[in-house]
Image: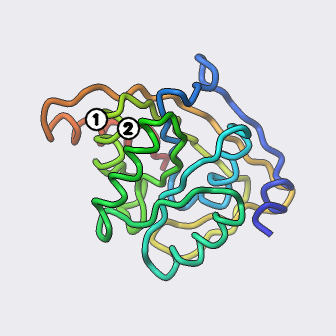
Amino acid sequence: MLRLLFLSQRLELRMPPEGLPETRRGLVFAFWHGKMATGWLLSRRLFPDTVPSAVVSLSRDGQLLSGTLGRLGFQLIRGSSSRGKEEVRAGIAERLRSGGLVAVTPDGPRGPIHRFKYGTLRLASETGSPILFADIAHERPRLLKSWDRFEIPAPFGKTVVTLHLVEVPRFSDEGEIQRFANSLSDRFTHA
């Protein structure tokens, strides 16, 4: 059903000026947790020759999602910032260093909404991998009453995706990561 819903969307892609990056340096594909219905499959569409990895929490919801993503052809990295953190960190770093694509929701699995967590940025910095952020705007989505304001796109509705390529600098301390995270979060949060 998720694949059919995605295929029904009238997708308008706005590419970054540099075009799509290659994945040979590793690539973090990021989108907000509430936009997952489009974000996961968008990564498959943009990079059809790459088997993406997806970071999925160990929660009950994560168990359901992992089954779906497995059937959609994703390699899974299970865990989150609260459970299995070291395994997730090692899995992401290994895939990025080998030139892989890792899809993440930088505000998941429990928020705060539309705020980048430091782990994603720290790993992108350490591996020299850029972030491709997908700013997804669904036309008249159905909104769930969840912490992430989860959006179910309207079938055959218009979805505008603006892609932003973010080169992540080397950080010398935690303060720099925090300032960079706040700057990105503010940049990609809409009222």
Left or right for 75, reference 118: right
99 or 154, nearer to the observer: 99
Task: Tell me which residue sits at (22%, 42%) in the image.
Answer: 178
The part of the image, by quadrant, that contains residue 58 is bottom left
Task: Tell me which residue sits at (48%, 58%) in the image.
Answer: 55
Quarter of the image for the N terminus: give it: bottom right
Residue 61: image location, x then y, percent: 52, 78
Disc 2 crowd, CA 10 A, few/some/many (<14, 14-19, 20+): some
Task: Tell me which residue sits at (49%, 82%) in the image.
Answer: 60
72 or 184, nearer to the observer: 72
- Image height of 64 relative to 178, above or below: below
7 or 159, nearer to the observer: 7
Residue 5: image location, x then y, percent: 81, 62
Determine which residue is flagged by label 2. Answer: 184
Identified by mark 1, the residue type is Phe
Determine which residue is flagged by label 1. Answer: 180
162 or 170, nearer to the observer: 170
Q: Are marks 2 and 1 in contact (CB under 8 Å)?
A: yes
